[in-house]
Amino acid sequence: MKATPKYELLVDVSKPVEEIAEFISLMLQLHPGQKLEILEQVDEQVGMALSDLEVQQKTEKNET
């Protein structure tokens, strides 16, 4: 059975942007041949989250 490397993270939740950026940097260092693919997928996930949030905010605004 192949061992899978794992990281345990301690994060400062008062600095979410910095902590997320640091984690992304770590993952990119661990997968140098996949940087573009990783960043594109992260970009897609962030874009979907932003879109969902915008829809939610518009819905809440229309309800008031």
Image: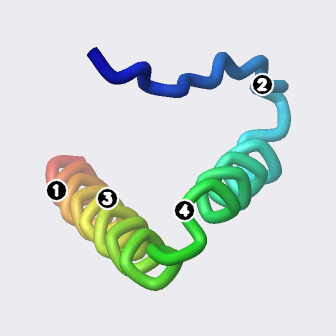
Image quadrant where residue 57 sits = bottom left
Mark 2: which secondary structure? loop
The residue under label 4 is: 31
**Amino acid tagged 4:** His
Picture layout, residue 6 above or below residue 20? above
The residue that mark 2 highlights is 11
Residue type (three-letter) at the residue carrying disc 2: Val
The location of residue 45, given as percent across then percent down, is 31, 63
**Amino acid tagged 3:** Ala
Asked if residue 38 lies left or right of residue 54, the reply is right
The residue at the point 55 percent across, 23 percent down is 6
**Residue visible at 46% across and 84% down in the picture:** 36
Q: Nearer the viewer, mark 4 or mark 3?
A: 4
Badge 2: how crowded within 10 Å, few (<14), some, or many (20+)? few
Q: CA distance from mark 4 to mark 3?
A: 24 Å
Mark with earlier residue (4, 1): 4
Say which amino acid is labelled 1.
Thr
Label at residue 49: 3
